[in-house]
Each structure stands twice: as structure tokens, then as C-alpha cells.
Image: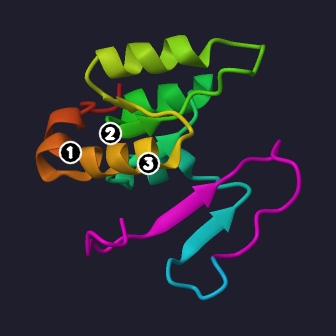
Amino acid sequence: LVRSGRAARLLMVYGPNYPGEIPASGPRGEVLIERRRFVGELPEVIAASDLVISNAGYNTMLELRAAGTPALILPLSSTGRDDQDARAATFASDGRGLIARAELKDTAAKIEAVLDSEAINRFAIDPGPDP
């Protein structure tokens, strides 16, 4: 993302169930990542984003679908409570985004693929007016 030269605001919302605090950006501050445990307006943040990188939690996947925001999904396969792999696969097969695994090279390549302007247009879906 940094090498692309694109202007970017990076926001990491790590949720109330994440153990401990997430430290501030890297030591030299080359990439500023705003980190928050909670965002009250998360649906609006998702809708305003060019790309969301997320696990495949039930609520987040519903918010992504409602917003029409392209996403790179990194499903948690070991949650034991739900099937994030299946939700991610359905999301991707519906043409809404891509799935990546935790390997850094795979994730970086998928981010570049989704941020390609043609891909953004292909993945983004107008959710239509609120009911």
C-alpha cells in the first residue's frame, strides 16, 4: 500500500474481545495506523471505505453486504463457534471481494488486486436506498 503512492487513511478496529491493547504505529512512523478498540459508527466507516480487511464474523459480513464495500476477508478457521470459511467463500463467490490467508505475501498481493481501480468498480455494489 505504501509503495503504491495512494493516499490512505488506515484504521484498525480491533474490538472489545481482543486481549490487551494494540500499540501505536511502527517505531519510525512510516505508516500511521489509527487503532481503536471500538467505533460507534462502524457501519458508516465501512460504507465510506475503499477497502475493508476483516475476518468473516457474522455481523461484519452483514455490514459489508449492506454497505456494498469491497473487502479482503481473512477468515478465522479456528473459532470453533461458527464457520467463517463458509461465510468468506460465499462472499467471494458472490463477487464481493477476495479471500486471503494469513501469509503476508498472499495478503499483500490480494490488497493490491482489490485496490486496482478496475477491481474496486467490479467488487463495489450499490446497496440502494435504505428501506
Give the magenta-colored segment's residue range: 1-25
Q: Mark 1 and mark 2 in contact (Cβ < 8 Å)?
A: yes
Element on which disc 3 rests: helix
- Front-most of 66 and 83? 83
Element on which disc 1 rests: helix
Marker disc for residue 32: none
Q: Mark 3 and mark 2 in contact (Cβ < 8 Å)?
A: no
Element on which disc 2 rests: loop
- Front-most of 14 and 73? 73
Is 12 included in the stretch rendered in magenta? yes
Q: Residue furthest bottom?
A: 28
Measured along the vertical axis of the image, is residue 125 above or below residue 88?
below
Marker disc for residue 105: 3
Disc 2: which residue? 70
Disc 1: which residue? 120
Residues under labels 2 and 1: Cα distance? Answer: 7 Å
Main SS, magenta region, reads loop
Which residue is found at the position 57% from the left and 39% from the top? Answer: 102
Residue 100 in percent (x, y) is at 45, 34
- Density class for disc 3 (Cα within 10 Å; few <14, some 14-19, many ≥20) is few
Measured along the vertical axis of the image, is residue 125 above or below residue 112?
above
Residues under labels 2 and 3: Cα distance? Answer: 20 Å
Residue 66 in percent (x, y) is at 39, 30
Is 107 included in the stretch rendered in magenta? no
Screen quadrant of the C terminus: top left
Screen quadrant of the N terminus: bottom left
Which residue is found at the position 56% from the left and 71% from the top? Answer: 33
